[in-house]
Amino acid sequence: MSSQANVPQTVSSIRNVVLVGSAGSGKTTLYEHLLRSRTPGYRGEKMDPERTAALAVTSIQVGSTTVTLLDAPGHPDFVGELRAGLRGADGAVFVISASDGVDAATEALWHECAAVGMPRGIAITKLDDGRSDFSSVLADLQAMWGQAVQPAYVPLKEGDKITGNLSLVSQSAHDYTSGQRVRRDATGAELSTIEEHRAALIEGIIQESEDDALMDRYLEGDVLKQDELVEDLTKAIYTGRFFPVVPVASLNGVGVEELLTIIKNAFPNPSRHHLTVSKVAAGKIDSVQAEVGNPDGSLVAEVIRTTSDQFSGRGSLVRVFNGTLRLDDAVMVSGHRSLFTGRADDAHPDHDDTDKIGPMSVPGVTENTPTPQATAGQIVFVTKMTKAETSDTLSSKDSPVLVNPWNLPEPLLPVAIRAATRNDEDKLPAALNRLAVEDTTVRVASDAETKQTVLWTMGQAHIDLLLARLKDRYGVNVVSEPIKVALRETFIASAKADGSHVKQSGGHGQYAKCSIEVEPLERGAGFEFVDKIVGGVIPRQFIPSVEKGIRNQLEKGVVAGFPMVDVRVNLVFGKYHPVDSSDLAFQMAGSLALKEAASKPGTTALLEPLDKVTVTVDEQYMGAVMTDISGRRGQVLGTDADEAHHAIIHALVPQSELSKYAIDLRGLARGSGSFTREFHGYEILPTMIADQMIAASKEAGKG
C-alpha cells in the first residue's frame, strides 16, 4: 500500500510533534492508534529491538494539516534518539500511564523542555485497565507541574470502561460506543461533570494567554464563545506555559481524534520555533536567533538522526528550519562540537564540507513518498550524503551558519570487546566507525595500555543493541570481556641496591656496576633521576646509560608489569672497565639495580586510578547513594544541593569500582540519579587486592 503523504504548501499547515514518555507508558501504542486513524487497512508495525530503540517518524494528514509524528524511545539508554525527536519537533506530547504515574526521567525531561520553552501537552493512557482514576492522576500532575496542567477533555465512562470524552471547550460529548467517534450533545449529568472542570480550564487559558480583555469579560460573567477560547488556548500553548490534558484509552483508541484536534488547532507551526545559530570566525562563535519558517529564506537545516545500511549506505533524517532543500543542491555541511563542549571528539572531528543533496522522501505510514524538495518546517529522509553526521548543520554555501548542538549526557557504562575471529578483526574497525557516526551516544576508545577496545555506552540495553547491530547489520562477531584498569607501581619506602652486569665470553666482555638509592615521591610527581657520582667512578658518558636503563625498567614495571611512577633514583656509586664497559652494559646495570631495590620487602606497592565522581540525585536517595559509595571504597568529599533541591554528592572512587555504576545508580535512585566522572589521580591499592593482582600477573607470565 502506498502512502499518500503530501508535501505541505505552507508552513502554517505543518505540525511536528514528538511523543515522549517512559517505557511502558503506552506511548508507542498511542502512536500506532494515531497512524491507524488516518491509514485505512493499517495493522501496525512489527515490534523488534531496533524499533523500540529507535526514533520512528511518520507524516499523516489531519484535514489540510500535515502532522509529522515522532515516536521517541522511552528507555533511558536511548536518550540520543529522544534528543533527535525533540530537535525535530516544535511541540511535545508527554504520554503518562495512569497506573504508573511519572517516573524520574520523565519529570527531568519536562523541566528540560520547560527551560527552552517547548510547547507541551499531556496524554493520559491506561485509564481502561481498571486500576486508575483520571481525577487522582490529574491532581498528581498538577501537584508536580502546576495548575497550568488542565484537562481539555475528561473521560466518559460506563462502569470501569472508557467509552468517550467530554469536551470542556465545546461542552459536547465524543461518544465511541458505536466503534466510531460520534459527537453529540452532553446529557445533564455529563454537563455537570463538564462544569466541575471547565472553570479552571478557562481561567488557565485566559491567564496564560495574557488576554486581559477576555479575563475582564469572564470575571464579569460574560459567556465566552468557543472560537475565542480556542484562539486563546492556542496562544497559551504557544507560550509553553499551558498544558492541555487529553485522556486516552489504550485498548480502543478513545481520545485519538481529540488529541489530533489539539495538535492541529493548538500546537505551534514551525514558524514559531526558537532556533539559535552561530557564525564561526577565528575559533569564536557569535550566536543569534535565526529566521525560521521562511521557504524563500537562507537555508538552515539540521541532521537530527543518521542511519547506516550496508546496502543503501548512509541516510540522514533532516529537519529544515528555514529555506528550501532541493535535490542535487550543493550545501555546506558543518559540525563544530568542540567549540561548544570545549573538547575534541575523535569520532566526530570539527569539519566544514560541501555535500550534495541526494534523493529525498517524506516519511509515510507504510512507505516514504519521494519529493524533489523540502521546505521550511518539513522533516525528510535524505540519502547518499557522505559527509553529514548527526547534529551537523546544512546551510547555504554563501551564508554558512551552525545550529547550536544539543547537549547529550556522557556515555558512562563501558564494555570491552574483541573480535571473535581473524576475519571479524579485519571488519571491526570500519563497523565501529559506522556505529559512532550513526549513534552520538556511543564512544569508541582504544586503550593502548590495556590493549582493549572499549565501547562507552548509556546502559545495558544500549550495549545489547550495539552488539546486535555489529553482528546483524555489519556481520561482525565480537566477544565482551571484563574491563581492565591500568594500574601503576611505586615505592613506598626508601631502598638501596646494587646492579651488576658482568660477562666475559671471549673478546670484549660486558662490565658495569652501579649503586642506587630509591626514594618515594608524592603522588603525581613522576620520576626524578639524580646524579651523585663523584670521583669519576662511572665515566660521564655512561651516566645517561644508567638513567636510560632505569627508565626502561620503570615503563615495564617491576612488581606486576605495570609502569612505575613517583620515585626518585639517586645514582651514588659504581664501577667500570676501560675496555669492557659500554652503553648497553650500564643500561642493564641500572635496570638490575632497580629490580633489586624493588625486591626488598615492604618497599613497593600498586597504585590504582581514582575518578572524581559527582552524583546528582533526589534528596530521598542521598543516604543510600553515600552508603553505596563507601561500599565501593570511595571517599565522600562533600555534598550540596542545586536549585531543584537535588542532592549533589562529590566523591573519589576507584575506577575499578565504577565499571557498572551507571546501572547500579539507576537502580539505587529509581532512575532519578545521574553522575559525571573525571580522572583524579592514583592512590595505593589495598594489600589484599594488590596481592591478587601480583599473583595473577605472575601466573600470566608463566603462560
Image (tube, rainbow, N blue to C red):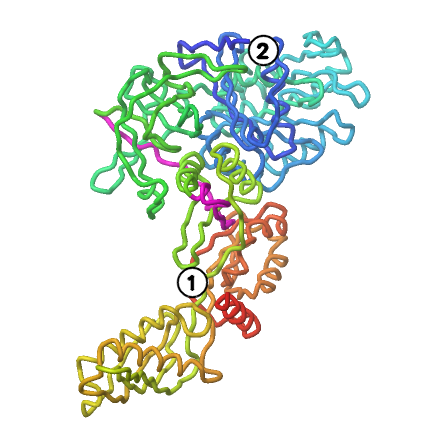
Image position, residue 362 (x, y; %): 44, 16
**Above or below — where is 116 with respect to 57?**
below
Q: Earlier in the sequence, mark 2 or mark 1?
A: 2
Q: Is residue 311 magenta?
A: no
Residue linked to disc 2 = 39
Residue type indicated by callout 1: His
- Helix, strand or loop at label 2? It is loop
- Give the percent coordinates (x, y) of residue 527: 32, 73
Q: Is residue 203 left or right of residue 571?
A: right
Task: Tell me: residue 481, above or below residue 560.
Answer: above
- Front one among 693 and 618: 693
Q: Quadrant of the N terminus?
A: top right
Q: Residue 239 at what x, y percent from top left?
A: 47, 27
Inter-mark Cα distance, 2 to 1: 57 Å
State the extent of the magenta-drawn residues as a range.
399-425
From what the image shows, is residue 406 above or below residue 444? above
For label 1, the residue is 680
- Residue type marked 2: Thr
In screen coordinates, is 549 left or right of 12?
left
